[in-house]
Amino acid sequence: MKNKPSCFKCEADVTSFSFIDYPVSDKLLTIVFCKECGAVQGIVTKEK
């Protein structure tokens, strides 16, 4: 059986994750967090 992504803190399903785009100079940070408990799951950086 494959492991499904879930919150590391409250084990909520990946469907409870929310994404916020945050521009910083010439990059765009995407912050992934759990809507259930508020724990940050990760941060992704992209060039604009």
Image (cartoon, rainbow, N blue to C red):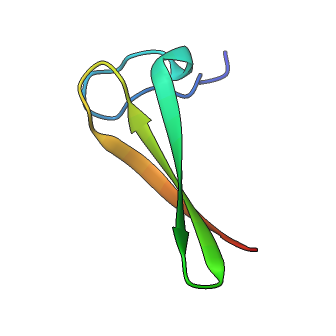
Q: Position of residue 24 (x, y in %)?
A: 52, 76
Left or right: 34 as drawn, with respect to 6:
left
| Quarter occupied by the N terminus | top right
Above/below status of 27 relative to 17: below
| Quarter occupied by the C terminus | bottom right
Left or right: 15 as drawn, with respect to 16:
right
Above/below status of 35 relative to 30: above
Above/below status of 44 relative to 47: above
Left or right: 12 as drawn, with respect to 37:
right
Q: Nearer the viewer, residue 26 or 7?
A: 26
Tally of numbered discs: 0
In which image quadrant can residue 3 be found?
A: top right
Q: Position of residue 35 (x, y in %)?
A: 36, 23
Residue at image location 47% in from the left, 18% down from the top: 16
Q: Nearer the viewer, residue 3 or 42?
A: 42
Q: Position of residue 29 (x, y in %)?
A: 55, 64
Residue at image location 39% in from the left, 29% down from the top: 7
Residue at image location 49% in from the left, 27% down from the top: 17
